[in-house]
Amino acid sequence: MYFVGLDLAWGEKNQTGVAVVDADGRLLHLGVAHDDESIATAIAPYVDDECLVAIDAPLIVPNETGARPCEAALNRDFTTFEAAASPAYRGRPEFNPPHGEVLANRLDLDMDPHSRAKRRAIEVFPDSATVVLFRLAKTLKHKRGEFDIRKSELLQLMTFIEGLDDASPRLRVNRNPAWVELRKRVEAATRPAHLDRDDDPVDAVICAYVALYQFHRPEDVTIYGDFETGYIVTPSPSGEVAPQRRGSRSSLENRLIRAMELLEDVQRELVAIREALR
């Protein structure tokens, strides 16, 4: 079975991040596509049979105005983490019809989150997923803002993803050549356009992992909303993921914590390398 992640552009002409992992968590494909035809071509080898395609874009949008119930419910749990979902409604041209729905129908994927069909699509939201998976006090700001902050946050996100090699389920990206090359590009980035090019595939990996996570740990996933009014699938918030109270830590303390986490990751990697060289 394959788990496909799409950081789907709301318009068909913009860039979409694409990632595919197998049931053992191995990253098999990583890249970008620029229209539905190239998306379909990229994932064709992985969606002919059993598959779960996790799409970061609204799939079901029946409401003409306002937020969907799923967005309101998710936002009650995640706004504190700055992980609120934007409202999707038919009054916005990009959601009439939603690009996600069009693509899922093109691929003939069942969009019911409770379906047991062999070939399915679900709507996911990387911001809420990263808050839970990485126990973040706030979402990482790698999409917008000052260049240096975006670059640092994107590299931090990539480090967190690499750390899922020790998680359950396991995600194995570290030895994938496309991932290694992507990290090198981000490290060498000098302009915002470089980050715009490279952050979509990273989010696509998160989407693919949420699909894998739901498959292996369905009891630890929350489905906000329903098939009729729209839904979002995300790892469930728990007591271990507690919002940071305003003023409880300084920005320097947060940077120190992240630096320590990075050092721990590096130390684990050094141990693994030494073991492999013996």
Image (tube, rainbow, N blue to C red):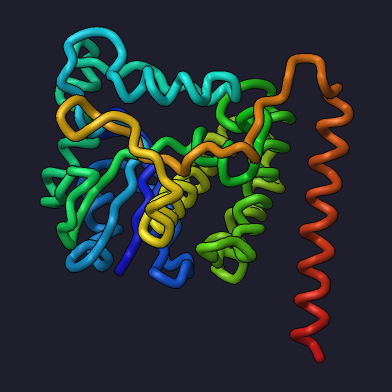
Which sits in the foreground, 155 or 108? 108
Q: Quadrant of residue 124?
A: top left
- Residue 86 is situated, as x and y percent measured from the top left of the image, at 40, 18
> How many callouts does the rendering have?
0
Going by the image, does 201 lie left or right of 266? Answer: left
Going by the image, does 205 lie left or right of 69? Answer: right
- Residue 83 is situated, as x and y percent measured from the top left of the image, at 53, 25
Quarter of the rendering occupied by the N terminus = bottom left
Going by the image, does 239 lie left or right of 30? Answer: right
Residue at left 42%, top 25%? 74
- Residue 190 is situated, as x and y percent measured from the top left of the image, at 69, 37
Going by the image, does 253 lie left or right of 21? Answer: right
Which sits in the foreground, 74 or 85? 74
Is residue 8 at all visible to an observer of this figure?
A: no
On screen, 40 above or below 223?
Answer: below
Residue at left 60%, top 25%? 81
Which sits in the foreground, 174 or 165? 165
Q: Residue furthest bottom?
A: 278
Is residue 213 at all visible to an observer of this figure?
A: yes
- Residue 3 is situated, as x and y percent measured from the top left of the image, at 35, 59
Q: Quadrant of residue 238?
A: top right
Residue at left 22%, top 22%? 95
Quarter of the rendering occupied by the C terminus = bottom right
Residue at left 68%, top 36%? 153
